[in-house]
């Protein structure tokens, strides 16, 4: 508790817990947090639950934000950041998987970081999620240029002002954690990881659609890279077109003694793609004030 008090004196902390139909686990989650961190603000965002989640929360003496309809995991976190009073916000799931005792470890690492993420072990990942997560991480790392140990962990701490700064580009769904991770890496922020263990989901039902949310996440990765570094997409595409066009042009000149329309089209398309990428990069810098 000494470490908690030191952090609390320097920076006020808000623990944001999004909840949707978690009547079986929300009480124990909140009570554990209150017991370990009595001085921190606990803000629960109910995302239009249709069970008894709200009535359970109301008995626990914490700040509640009630969404009239189900807006999504990301929307709940964004609302939580806007309503939070702390300088530092901690995202924590309500389904009992995260050990609240790890919050102090996240906050301790915040001394030297802009965001600290709880990194899950391979053993803790659901088996049928591993292939999708591997592909997602690979694509993200290629586009962003950083090793990302856990791209979408929902257990993390960051400065509220940074979270609010990225709100316009953050989605309303489960891809918020992926997007803010990529955004902070692309802006040169210090993102740290600490290993955590997660428990088996104690109640409720996961609302993640692996196919739909996976496709959305890949699209969002492309969107974020387009916003922060468009040349990561346009430069390789331009190089490929110019390489193919150059080889094809050389082939036709040597074996056919002719310059075909196809070879010219490939080369011109490659040049046009590069110029378009440079223009997109300038627009990106202007938009972000870079």
Image: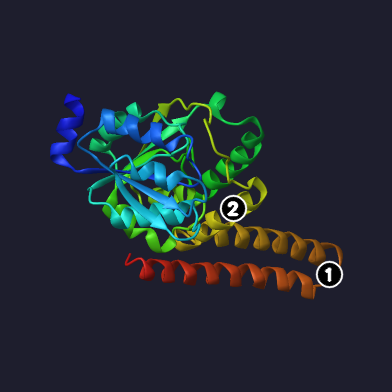
58 sits left or right of 234 in the view: left
Q: Badge 2 is on which residue?
A: 218
Which quadrant does the C terminus fall into? Answer: bottom left
Q: Is residue 129 left or right of residue 259?
A: left
Q: Nearer the viewer, mark 1 or mark 2?
A: 2
Q: Position of residue 286 (x, y in %)?
A: 36, 70
Label number found at residue 257: 1
Residue 120 locus on image (x, y percent)? 48, 30
Above or below residue 3? Residue 161 is below
Number of numbered labels in the structure image: 2
Of all residues shown, which one is farthest toward the bottom? 261
- Color theme of the render: rainbow
* Mark 2 burial class by Cα count in 10 Å: few <14, some 14-19, many 20+: some
Relative to 32, say whether 211 is above or below: below
Image location of residue 242, percent across then percent down: 65, 63
- Of 180 and 257, nearer the camera is 180
């Amino acid at each position: 508790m000494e470490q908690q008090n030191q952090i609390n004196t320097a920076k006020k902390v808000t623990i944001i817990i999004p909840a949707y139909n978690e009547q079986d686990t929300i009480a124990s989650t909140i009570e554990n947090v209150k017991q370990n961190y009595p001085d921190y603000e606990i803000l629960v965002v109910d995302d239009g639950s249709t069970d008894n989640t709200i009535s359970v929360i109301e008995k626990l003496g914490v700040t509640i934000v009630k969404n009239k309809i189900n807006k999504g995991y990301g929307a709940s976190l964004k609302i939580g950041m806007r309503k939070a009073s702390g300088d530092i916000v901690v995202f924590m799931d309500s389904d009992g998987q995260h050990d609240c005792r790890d919050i102090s470890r996240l906050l301790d690492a915040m001394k030297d970081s802009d965001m600290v993420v709880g990194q899950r072990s391979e053993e803790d990942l659901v088996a049928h999620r591993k292939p999708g997560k591997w592909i997602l991480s690979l694509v993200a790392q290629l586009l962003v240029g950083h090793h990302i140990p856990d791209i979408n962990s929902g257990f993390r701490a960051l400065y509220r002002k940074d979270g609010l700064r990225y709100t316009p580009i953050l989605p309303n769904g489960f891809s918020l954690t992926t997007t803010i991770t990529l955004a902070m890496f692309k802006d040169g922020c210090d993102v740290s990881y600490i290993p955590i263990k997660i428990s088996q989901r104690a109640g409720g039902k996961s609302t993640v659609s692996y196919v739909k949310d996976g496709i959305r996440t890949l699209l969002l990765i492309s969107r974020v890279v387009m916003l922060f570094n468009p040349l990561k997409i346009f430069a390789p595409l331009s190089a490929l077109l110019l390489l193919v066009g150059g080889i094809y042009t050389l082939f036709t000149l040597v074996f056919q003694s002719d310059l075909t329309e196809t070879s010219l089209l490939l080369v011109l398309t490659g040049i046009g793609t590069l110029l378009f990428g440079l223009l997109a990069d300038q627009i990106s810098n202007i938009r972000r004030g870079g």
